[in-house]
Image (cartoon, grey):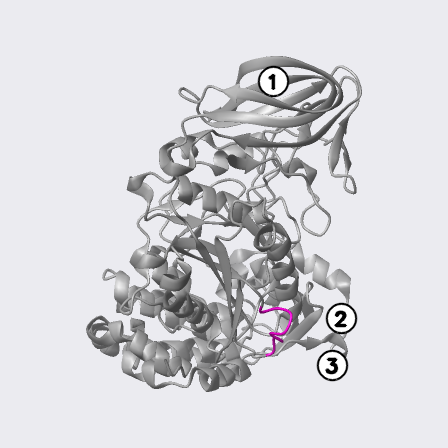
Amino acid sequence: MVIQNILFPEIGKCTEQELYFRQEEEYRGYRIVDEKKQKAGRIYTAKKAAYSYSEKHLTLKKGECIVFDTYFNGFSIDKWKKYTILDNLQLCLTLQGKLKVTLVSKQRMHGHVVEKVLSETAVDCAKKQAWDFAYDIQSAKGMLAFKLEAAQDSIFYSGAYCSTIPDSRLRNIRLGVGICTFRREEYVRKNLKILRSSILENEGSPLYGRMEVFIADNGRTLETQGLGTQGIHIYPNCNLGGSGGFTRTLIEMKKSSRRRGITHALLMDDDVVIEPEALAKTYTVLALAKEDYAGAFIGGAMLRLDRQAVQAEAGAAWNMGFLNSMKAGLELESCEACLLNEVEESAEYNAWWYCCFPLEIVTEENLPLPLFIRGDDVEYGIRNMKQLILMNGICVWHEPFENKYSSFLEYYIIRNQLITNAFHCPEFGAGQLNRIMLSHCLREITYYRYKNVDLYLQGIKDFMKGPGWLMAQDGEKLHGKVMQAGDQAVALNELDMGFYYRDYEKSRKDYGQHSSRKKRFLTLNGLLLPAEDENVAPMAAAIGVHFYRKKRVMHYDEAGGKAFITERSFVMTIKYICRVAAMCFVNRVKWDRAVRKYRLHGKKLRRLGFWKEYLGLRN
C-alpha cells in the first residue's frame, strides 16, 4: 500500500519548490519570521531545479543532485513508528536515465542536522522504469529522505513511500468532511472540484469510497444542483457562525453514521487551499493507528496563503486565552526547519481549519458550544482532545490572520474566552480578568478605537448574564447588532482623508525604536500634548507609536484595500477610562456567580436538544 506519495509543486495550489525538493547545495538555514525584532536567520541563495509544471516531472542535468528532505516529501519515521503499526517501508520511484539513488536519514541534534547515508544504488535505464529501494526502519530516527544525482541527463517522473502491510491489519476508516461556509461559493466550488477529481471520483485514491462531504450553507446561497452529488451533501443552515455550521455537519454525520459507516469527522474551513495528499495521509495514519492512539486527533497545520512556505500555526495551547500558536512563523524551506517542526509540544487543541477526530466522541451530550465564532474549536478541543498528532505535509493554506481584521471580533474574543475559562480554567478569576481588560481597553483607547472598547465591555457584560441568556438568544440577530457596533472598513475613496502609501509604509516599519518610550508613557501617548497631524497605520498591526500626537489615524488593510478612520478625543478618552474603571468593580461582584452558572447549567448548551431548537431542525 502507498503510505505517502512524492508530491510536486502545482500551479493553482503551491509553487514553492523548496517545500517539495531542492538542489543539495542550496538553502540550508532556517529562520523565524519576526519583523518587529528585525531578526535575520541564515539565508542562502536558492537554485531552482528544472521542473515542468505541464508535464509534471523533474529533469536533472548531468551532475545535478536533488534532495527530497522537504516538508512534503520527507518521511516522518519517528511519528509513523510511534503512532502506527508500520513495520516495513520501501521507496518506489519511476525514473529514466543514469542516476545514483541515495537513501538517507536526518535528525536535528543540538541545532545541527545530522545526516546518515543508509544505502546507495546506481540506476541505469534508457526508458521510463519503476524501481524499489528498501529502508531498514527498525533503527531509523528523525526524517527519512532520498537524493537523486544524475550521471547524465535524467528524468524523475513519480514516486511514493510504500509498505507491504496486508489489508487485514488496516482499521476500517471512513471520513466525514465537515465544511461550514457563508457566501463563499467560489472557494466551495474550487475545493469540491479538487475533492472530486482527487478522491471522490478517483479509484486510485486510498480514500475512494471512504469519504463523504457534509456542507453547512450558512448563507443559504449555494446552488445544490451540480454540487450536491454522490458523496457530497449540502444543508441550508441558519447563519450561526462557525460553531453553528460545524455543529450542523456533525449532527448530520451522526444521523447517517450507521448507514454510511462514518468513523471520523474532519472539520475544515471553506476558504482554504487543499492539498489532497493531506487527506490521504490522514486516512493512512488512522488506518494504521496503534490501539493506544485510536482515539487521537489529527491536526493540520495552517500555512500562509500569501507566503506559502511560512507556517502560521501547528497546534496550539489555550493558556487561559493567552494563546500559544506553536511553530508560528517557521519558514519551512529547509530540512532543519522541517525537523524542528516535528518536535512535539503540549498542545491543547487544533483549530478547525483542519481537524480530524473520532466521530464516537460526538454524542447527544457532547456537541460544541454555540459561541458563533472565535473559540468553538478551542473549547471543544480542550474538552475532548487527549492526544494530537501533527505531521509535516498535513496542512492547508489559509489567509493569514492579519489580513482578516474585523472590529466586531472584539466582542466574541473576550466573551468566548471567558466562557471557555469558566468551564476549564478554575484558576482564572476576576483579578486576572480586570488586568487583561485594563490592558486591552487602554490600548484601544490609545488607538482612538472607542467602538472596540464598547464591544469588549459588552462581551464581558453578556458573559456575566450566564448560559441561560446565551440559550435564549437569536444568534443571527445578535450577530447583526454586534457587526454594526464596530468600525466599518470602506473603500479609500469613501473616506474624507487622503491616503498616501509612503505614510503607511513608514508606519509599518516603525516599532517605536526612534522615539522616547518614557515620553509617550508620561503623556498618555501624546494625549496630554497638542495633536500635530494625521497618520496611516496597518489595521491589524497598529501600535501606540502610530498614534502619538496624531489627530486622526487611518487604519488601512493592505490585503483588502479598505480602511476606517479613528479620531482623537480627550473627552471620549476620559469617558472610556471611567467606564473601564467602573467595570472593574462590576467584575469583582459578578464573576464568581457567573462562573457557577456556567458550571451548573452550561452543559445544556452542548446537548442535541438545545442545538435542534437553536438551528431550527425538526428531526
The residue stretch that appears in magenta: 221-228
Residue occupied by mark 1: 102
The spot of residue 427 in percent (x, y) is 24, 60
Q: Quadrant of the C terminus?
A: bottom left
User: Cα distance, mark 1 to mark 2?
Assistant: 57 Å
The spot of residue 27 in percent (x, y) is 66, 30
Q: Quadrant of residue 529?
A: bottom right
Q: Residue at x 74, y 77 (%)?
A: 497
Secondary structure type for disc 3: helix
* Residue 68 in the figure: left or right of residue 479: right
Report the mark closest to the observer, 2 or 3.
Answer: 3
Q: Amino acid at mark 1?
A: Thr
User: Cα distance, mark 1 to mark 3?
Assistant: 61 Å
Q: Tell me which label, 1 or 3, sits earlier in the chain.
A: 1
Marker disc for residue 499: 2
User: Cα distance, mark 2 to mark 3?
Assistant: 11 Å
Res 108 seen here: yes
Out of 611 and 328, give the one closest to the viewer.
Answer: 611
Q: Residues within 10 Å of mark 1 (few under 14, many from 20)?
A: some
Secondary structure type for disc 2: loop
The spot of residue 279 in percent (x, y) is 52, 49
